[in-house]
Amino acid sequence: MLDQPAISRDVDGVGLTYGLCAIVIWGSFPLYFKQTELFGFLSVYGHRALWAMPFMLLVLLLMRSWRGVVLVFRSRRLLLPIMMTILIVAVQQALYIWGIFSERIVELSMGFYLVPAFSILLGCLFFNERISKAQWVAVGLSVSGVAALVIFLGENPWLGVTMGFTFTIYSAIRKRLSVEPAVGLFLETVPLFFIGLWFVIQFPLQDDQSVFSLSGLLLPFSAVYTILPILLYVMASRRMPLSLLGTLFYLAPTGTFLIGVAVYDEVFSLIHMVAFLLIWSGLGIYLWAGRAKQ
């Protein structure tokens, strides 16, 4: 998702701090959004979308990157990919919040573990990339894990699969766009602002609820809470190797997974354990194969 190249190959203490902070925030999303559940899914989604654009506008002004926005609008080549990422972000945000409220946190974490498998398949099918034996093994193990849930439990993990697949598509598009991350994020929030405004008007808070209350402040701050780790991740990518940062990224869904099981007591049977072990094994082989190429 974040396509800034690393400038240094050495592990920088500040960069590592940025990266770990981003991962901790990402992993703690369920804890945060569970506190907003009393406001209802539609209100929470609306406020998250509404407040993201003003926050990113402030970031652009502070970074003095507003000229990049003008350049995008002058380039027809960039408009279509940006529109595609806007659609993906809108869908992902809605599904993620809905998944937390629907007690499917473990499944959400599974989706991000599947990203390597989707990346391998995407590279093979659309970019003619050569796939090594180790990578095929990684894909096979990940697919087997999902299949185990379907066959033995009759579950349809569509939410996790959709999150992983759309995240992969988003990452592939953003990686090939010559757009600054902050500019891209701002452009993605502009249409969402109007979508969020419609949701906030159509689904207002109850009479005993206020956005200015202590709990109500979680609604506008949710935009900051979800965008801040992306910006931290970008800053980290400029100070440390992307191979290390990419490996550390998987600590985020691990945190999400542990919160789902340990804090919110989501179902995690023996079949779930076998399925996740297969998916984790596929992830491990994928990361090992990537480091072996270096």
Image (spheres, rainbow, N blue to C red):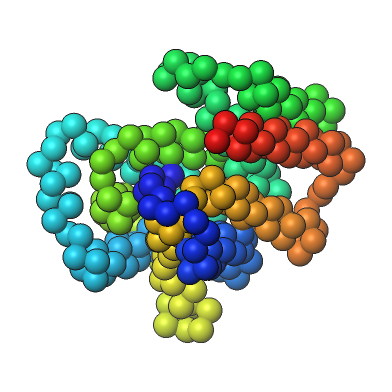
Residue at 66 percent of width and 36 percent of height: 288
x and y, in percent, of residue 110 in the image: 67, 42
Q: Which residue occupies the foreground of this view, 142 or 224?
A: 142
Residue at 57 percent of width and 60 percent of height: 23
x and y, in percent, of residue 280 in the image: 73, 39
> Quarter-wise, where is residue 273 in the image?
top right
Residue 191: tell me if it is visible.
Answer: no
Q: Which residue occupies the foreground of this view, 40 or 238?
A: 238
Q: Which residue occupies the foreground of this view, 184 or 268?
A: 184
The reply, left or right, for residue 2 in relation to residue 21 is left
- The residue at the far left in this view is 74
x and y, in percent, of residue 8 in the image: 42, 54
Name above or below for residue 154 compared with residue 42. Answer: above
Name above or below for residue 208 compared with residue 142. Answer: below
Locate the N terminus by quadrant: top left
The reply, left or right, for residue 211 in relation to residue 144 is left
> Quarter-wise, where is residue 37 in the image?
bottom right
Q: Which residue occupies the foreground of this view, 237 or 218?
A: 237
The reply, left or right, for residue 136 in relation to residue 18 is right
Residue 228: tell me if it is visible.
Answer: yes
Name above or below for residue 199 compared with residue 151. Answer: below
Locate the C terminus by quadrant: top right
> Quarter-wise, where is residue 81 in the image?
top left
